[in-house]
Amino acid sequence: MNGQTEAKQSPLDISYLTAKYLMPILERKWLIIAFFISGSIVSFILSSFIKPEFYSIASLLVQEPRSKISSKTETNPMVPRTADETYVLSEAEALRSVPLVTEVLKILPEKVKEELDINLDPYQQIVNGLKSAAKKWLGLNWLTSSDTQEVGKSVPANPGDIDKERIGALQNRVIIKSKSKNAMLWITATSTNKYAAPIIVASYISVWMARNLEDNKRSIQVEKKFALEQRDTARNHLNEAAKKLMDFRNHYEIPTYVTPKEGLGDMELQSDFERLQGQVKGATERFEYLDQIVLKLQMEESGIAENIKLLDSPTSPGAPSKTLKPEILLIGILGGLGVGIGIVLGLDFLKSPIRHEKDITIAVDVPIFGHIPKI
């Protein structure tokens, strides 16, 4: 057309892509290799600051509390009844509460408490690791050691603030999941030490079961307290009735072996004698009845147990459940390789060398009439 030949190019010209992108990479391959090695080294150093995470989980079945069982007709005491949905949800919320977490923190070993001070955020671990390494390499620890010691002496750490931070760390590390329809609860703990996670879960279970046992005992203790008060009242009535009867016998000089059945001869005295004897008998029967109730409640209290059943105990994981080291290494390797290739192609773009006939046609916009063969 108009004396110009229109070259037909394929949609994907391999020779052009090779000359435009592959040749610059091969020409500056050592620069790419240098960035590749640098990225690998940096990612290896950064990944060394990241601590692995270990998980430990325990599953529990929540049964009906004693207060609800006692209010229903017992059908089969050997078959445990699962708690209703509302009770399960309330127990799950109690496990997340600050008072219970505070009790858990009190019984944790000191090494586990120190492990709670480690931030699980990988970004913070890298930042803290770089800061520590920089201080060590630059000798800042030696320069600031005296100042730090004096500050530590003058302004000691507040134990209350440390406990608050550790309580917050426990709440973030421990996950409470519940399935109210099946009355199931799961306690999951995360730590950087594989032995700390099961200890944390076991401590949660211990505190929870102890509280649950006290709650179950509290319901029967109310009944026992009322029964004890009634028994004490019955004992006082019995003592009063026995004293009146004894005073009556002493006043009229009636021997102890004489009973109202034998008769006293005087109808009025006989009537008073029978009345006092009946009061003593009624007070005795009431006292014995209440005493049996108290004894029964005491036996129930000593044999009562928590309504939480541990199905799966927390165990120490053999391998880390989560770690970002492979991801960081991969990002560093690919990042270094990508940065190196990007710089090489960027430099080649700025220099704009002629590597293909398309570079000429794009620059001068004239047709090509011949080729110089390669020798």
Image: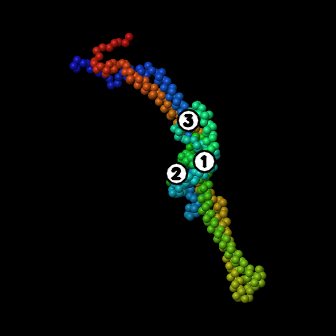
Tell me the CA gap for discs 2 and 3: 41 Å
Pointer 2: what residue?
Answer: 178
Asked whether residue 234 is in view, the answer is yes
The amino acid on which the numbered mark 2 sits, given as a three-letter code, is Ser
Dot 2 or dot 1, earlier in sequence: 1
Which part of the image, by quadrant, shows the N terminus?
top left
The residue lying toward the viewer, choosing from 217 and 270, is 217
Q: Percent x, y for residue 75? A: 57, 62
Compared across the picture, whether 320 is left or right of 348 comes to right
**x, y percent for residue 118:** 57, 41
Q: Secondary structure at mark 2?
A: strand
Q: Position of residue 34 (x, y in %)?
A: 49, 24
Q: What amino acid is found at the position of numbered circle 1 in the picture?
A: Asn
Label annotation for residue 131? 3
The circle drawn on residue 158 is 1
Residue 309 location in percent, x, y?
A: 59, 53
Q: Secondary structure at mark 1?
A: loop
Query: Which tag, 2 or 3, sits closer to the chain's start?
Result: 3
Q: CA distance from mark 2 to mark 1?
A: 36 Å
Image point (60%, 40%), residue name = 193
Q: Secondary structure at mark 3?
A: helix
Closer to the eye: label 2 or 1: 1
* Residue at left offset 63%, top offset 65%: 224
Q: Nearer the viewer, mark 2 or mark 3?
A: 3
The answer to whether residue 344 is above or below residue 160 is above
Residue at the image point whose x is 60% and y is 47% from the top: 158
Q: Amino acid at mark 3?
A: Lys
